Image (cartoon, helix red, strand yellow):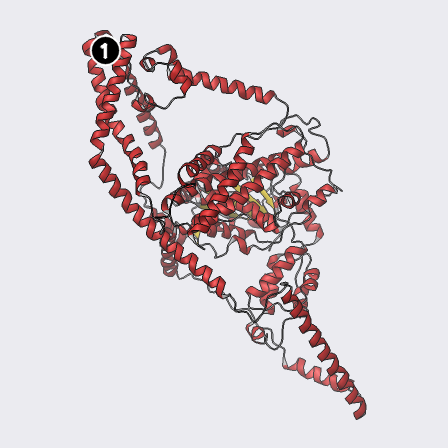
Amino acid sequence: MSDRTYKTLWSEAHGELSCVLARELSEEPVRDRGKFFQKLATLYVLYLQIFRKLEEAYDQSVHPQKRRVMRQVLEGVMGRILELKNEMVEYDFSEYHYMDDIIQDLKLIPEDLEIPVPRYFIRERKKELEEREEMFATLLNQMESIDKPEPPAVRMSTLERSINRERKAKENAIAITPDQAAVTIQKVWRGFVQRKNTKRLHEEETIFLRMAKNPKLPNPSPLKLAVQNNEANRRKRQEEYEDDYQKSISFVTELLWELESQEMKEIMKDQIRQWSIECRDGTGSFPDYPEEEDGGSALIFAEKTPEQRSWEPTSRMIATKDRSEKEEMKEKEKRNKGKAKEAEKEPGLRMRPSAFLEDLKKGHKRFSEVWKNKDESKNFSQRHEMELLKEEKRKVIKVEIRKEVDEVMRQELANLKLAVDKEKSGKSKGAVKKKAKKEGIKKGKVEEKQDKVDLTSERTLKSLFEELVQQKLLKKADHVKLKDYLGDYSYLGTTRLQSGIEPKPSLSDVRQVVALYAVLPLGSQVVHEKAPLVKSMLLVGPSGVGKKMLVHAICQETGANLFDLSPSNVSGKYPGKSGLQMMLQMVFMVARLMQPSVIWIGDAEKMFYKNVPKDEKELDPKRLTKNLSEIHKSIKGEDCILIVGTTNDPQRAELEPLCEFYNKIILIPRSDYASRHLIWRELIRDNGGEVTSNLDLSFLTKISEGCTPGHMVKVVCSVLSEHRIQQLPRRPLTASEFVSPLAGVVPEFHDEEEALKNWYSKTPLCKRRCTVFLGKEGRDKETPPKKGKGGMKKVQK
């Protein structure tokens, strides 16, 4: 696609953003809890559509300055989506939400609710990730620990079975006449020909109706290949234009310093002198020069509203103590707090203040003022605009020059005060003393921080990295993506809720929750700092449901390091208290210096055992509990670190400390019919098989109820051996071939699923949801969110 296409996509996204922002700003309190949740969900879906368009436009736009504006808005939209998700969880008391009715009203399809993973997460860190891969490869080669997967065993029929079959066939043979044999042959042949013709006609009809793909068409199609090549070429242009832009930045900066810096200094000095003279004429004394911490001279010439300018003369800006700007700011804060309290008194529910709305407004304003109606007919190649670059660099240079001018003018004003008014010279000394005291306090704080014991202070990052790899505490993530975690959409969620039945989430819902809580925050530092902080997440589900795969997918989508602190992996390493402290300091130092990072804890229930089994006492599974909990508390917004635990037996752990440690607990359900149908189809194709009309996927999906995706992978690998793949052209796959391997699989029984559900019902979030469902809480619609009743139906027992 062309540059015009992506510019149009960008404009459409901003048009939708303008409507959504206007909708948010004109917010009115909603009394009914169900309607309020509906409002949150609608905003969530609208922001998600903007997110999808902006991500595509940002990925393919080549103009460096446009991409920076897009990036600001894109991160703001991501953050706002996470904020809305957090509010929906608080009002609905569930990690999973169903929006069938909303997408129907907005005329969308289920695929539009999929969370796209921004491609710049990996692409803009390409060099860094390549260097890390080289380090891994070198260390693993030195350790000679590269494990090669063994080829799957090929099941061949034995000679004895073939002999037995022939013997039985001869025993069952009955003598018939030639006429009877001819009739039998004709009957079989005609039936075969008719079935073949019927099958051919059915395939032609499905291809004509676009219900099946034409096998004669090349795969991938030439059009798809052309699109892929075009996208690759645009990414190359992005890199070229970005390099050119960076060179222009250094050139323009040097040019502006050389040509305009002296003039800027003189203008600033004249303005400050004029200000001090006006204050002297108006008040009879020279004003105090604003401190650097308060903004310096920038505070004097800050933009003010017309009301402030008409009410406050220039001569009284700083000199008049009774009406200083600090006091005005305090008064404004008081007024705002008063308004907020009045708003709180109003009946109804409101959305929480957002940390991203201001960024969205600024980004939208920048687009509207600069790019929306800009004539780019002369910039066909979409290179950067020099005049815009100069404007941006002038602002940066002015800030640096202002600091230099402030130092000179502060001294000049102090000298004037000493010469004109000796009585006030003491105050300036006092101010200097105060400043010195502040600096002393700051130095004291730094010294206090330096006094903390750091066992890894003399180690280099490279040496720590190598040691963690050698100890197998830092591992290489498997090459899987989040989209490889297959699962279909839950189509009847809202319908079941309206019928009074608690809906069952699908694997698609799990994939979206993981993308929201893990991938988006870890991929963007800005989003992680401002969005609701998720420090840790626990994935609960039976073996084979894909918990470990999700951990590796998070690392692959964000380029995160994978640290394995599972009790079984840590056992016997770094013994003693000092060794444990050393290990954790190493892990979290490397995790912070090489962000983003994922700390994986497999068999997470072992850290919180109620009773440690006798055969595991030597492993000391609770060894990390205390120290890791302390480190967990120290994780802040600027630390792109996520602790992910996985467990298939949470009942063995103490519930309260487990729930305190993990902010989010995600229960992964048993796969439903739609998800199993999708998994069978994709697994067979990915392993070299072909899905034809001979393979009854519906039958296969039905008989595999209770099987996890892990079971299905094993079955497909056992059936699709190399020998069987070679036979596919003359002998297509049938569902009967999968029956025998499926018979040997132990499925997830209903009792096991109910046990996990019962355990999850005891978690704090699910307890609150059950309380609301049973009608024991929130009978008043105007009560605060934590005590209110959501417009939800009772659970059908």
The kind of secondary structure element at disc 1 is: helix
Q: Which sits in the foreground, 71 or 364?
A: 364
Q: For this view, does 10 lie left or right of residue 94?
A: left
Residue 26 placed where, x, y %?
56, 29
Residue 412 in view here = yes
Residue 359 placed where, x, y %?
45, 35
From the image, tell me which residue sits under label 1.
Answer: 425
Q: How many marks?
A: 1
In the rendered image, the residue lying farthest to the left is 419
Query: Does 372 sit above or below residue 687?
Result: above
**Residue under the image location 47 percent in, 63 percent down:** 225
Residue 560 in view here = no
Position of the C terminus, as image quadrant, is top right
Query: Does 305 sit above or below residue 212?
Result: above
Q: Which sits in the foreground, 626 or 137?
A: 137
Q: Amino acid at mark 1?
A: Ser
**Residue under the image location 20 percent in, 18 percent down:** 412
